[in-house]
Every structure is written in C-alpha cells, then in structure tokens.
Image (cartoon, rainbow, N blue to C red):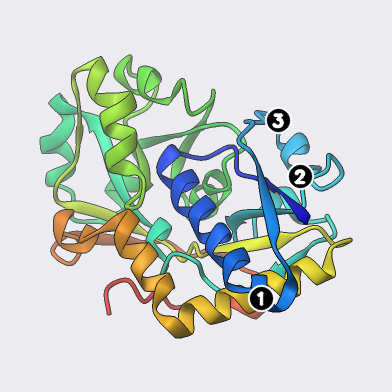
Amino acid sequence: MTTVNFWNGNKSSARQGYETELLQACLAATATDWGPAQLHIDNTDYPRAEDEGNIFSAGADILVTVAGNQKFKDKQKIILPRPLAKGLLGYRLIITRTESLGRFQALTEATALQALAIGIPATWADAEIFRLNSYCVVERGSFDDLFQLLKTGAFDYTSLGANEIEAAFAQRAEPLGGLSIEPTAMIYYPLPLVFYVNPAKPDLAKLVEAGLTALMASGEHDALFRKHHGDVVQRLGLRERKVFTLCNPFLPPEMADFTPTLLD
C-alpha cells in the first residue's frame, strides 16, 4: 500500500479537519483504479518561513496552501489549480477588542481601515497582500500569540477566513475576554486553497487530480464542504456585510481569473 505524507501544519484546526478529510476522500475515490493509499498526517507547525518553504525536501508529499504562497515562490512544485473551498478563506472577518466595535461599525471608506493596524502572525501569506494594498501591518509572533497581542493593544484588529474564524474565536480569543467578532464588515481578496504536490511525485498529482474530479462530479465535494462549514454564508451574514476588497497579485497565472463560488 502506498503511503502519502500530508503536511497539514501552520493553520487552524478547522482547516486541518476539512483538508484532511478532503484528501482522504480523493484517495478513496481513486482506490479502485490506482490502488489503496494510506495517509500519514503531519500537523507540525513551522514558525520559520524557510522551513515551510522546504517542506518537500523534509519528506512531505502533498499539502494544501493558498495559491501563489510566496514561501514556495522559487520552489519546485506541482500545483493542482482547482479551488478546494469555494474561495471561503478569502472572505476575512474581523476580530477586535470589544471596546473598539463602534469604531469599526462606523467605517465607510477603505482609507480609514487602512490606517488601523492589522495583526498577522509572522510568515502568514496574508501579510504581504495587506502591505501591497497599503494597509498598516504588524507581522509578529505566532497564531498562538495573536489574540493575546490583540488584547494588549499591539494592533487594532486581526482578520481570519470565514471558514476558521468561529472555531478560532471560541478556542483562542473568547477565553481571554474583551474580544469580539465584528458583525458588520468583511475584507475580501481572492485566496483559493489548492493542493501543492512534491515535484518528485507526478503520479500522486495525477491521482489526487483524478480523485478531486470524481468528488466534484459526484457531489461529494459539496457534501464535505457543507459538513465542515454548514450554512456559513447565512450564519455569518456574509451577503449583508460591507466589503473592503483587496487585490492579490500573487495568484499563479493559471488561477489569475479565479472567481469565488461561495456566494453564488
């Protein structure tokens, strides 16, 4: 039986759960034609960008990341340019100190939001996107540090994808007290999640591509998405929020025209 080494670190538990089950389903969908495969999951976090960028050299076969992740810019990899989460990660909601909610609810112009400091963990791909869109970025610490830094005033707010913000808030922010998910605003930029495959594993890339095609055709991909994210659009009021739109210049050429399907 083939063993597939899946690196699934440096992300929220909500993403880890969905992405693991999706890859498992891809492997299961191709077992008859390609043979059975066993998934070995590595959730190790690598705080240094160079360590993450060298993950294939460390033995990983496949990972899920944002398309155009700059940590892999000069690294050999096979990109499977099929969005895995309907663009959900690009819909970013704000967490701020509860006392500051009124400040955010009063925002009407992007320039006012740009002037406030957003906190982003070191090495996250979002930091450079915000900087290139003229936002004030404090890139500091790890995901574990993020909400304590916010609470103590190191920056004005942070933002997380709609697919992970509820779990992250409940597990990490709410226990600290004094923090809230802002209910009226949303930041959007195209941020599709895709599979990156070790360049030495072209057969694995073909297998996963075939599995993903089968899941999308059968409706199982949609079912998995609903299982993990439910009625996220309605639950978080994504259609009713005021939107601050950023550009993402890092999308690979094959995904330059990416359009999210989440709100369709």
Tag nearer the camera, 3 or 1: 1
Q: Is 164 above or below relative to 229?
A: above
Q: Is residue 250 visible?
A: no
Do the CB atoms of the residues marked 3 and 2 lie less than 8 Å apart?
A: no
In percent of the image, x 46 and y 66: which residue is there? Answer: 190
Q: Residues within 10 Å of mark 3 (few under 14, many from 20)?
A: few
Q: Is 219 above or below relative to 158?
A: below
Say the numbered circle drawn on residue 48. 3
Q: Position of residue 107 (x, y in %)?
A: 18, 49
- Relative side of 155 to 52, left or right: left
According to the picture, the residue beneath numbered tag 1 turns out to be: 32
Q: Position of residue 252 (x, y in %)?
A: 66, 70
- Give whichever of 95, 55 is nearer the camera: 55
Quarter where residue 223 is shown: bottom left
Badge 2 element: helix
- Relative side of 205 to 260, left or right: right
Tag nearer the camera, 2 or 1: 1
Q: Residues within 10 Å of mark 1 (few under 14, many from 20)?
A: few
According to the picture, the residue beneath numbered tag 2 turns out to be: 53
Quarter where residue 172 is shown: top left
Badge 1 element: helix
Three-letter residue code for mark 3: Arg
- The first of marks 3 and 2 along the sequence is 3
Three-letter residue code for mark 2: Gly
Q: Is 234 above or below relative to 6?
A: below
Three-letter residue code for mark 1: Thr
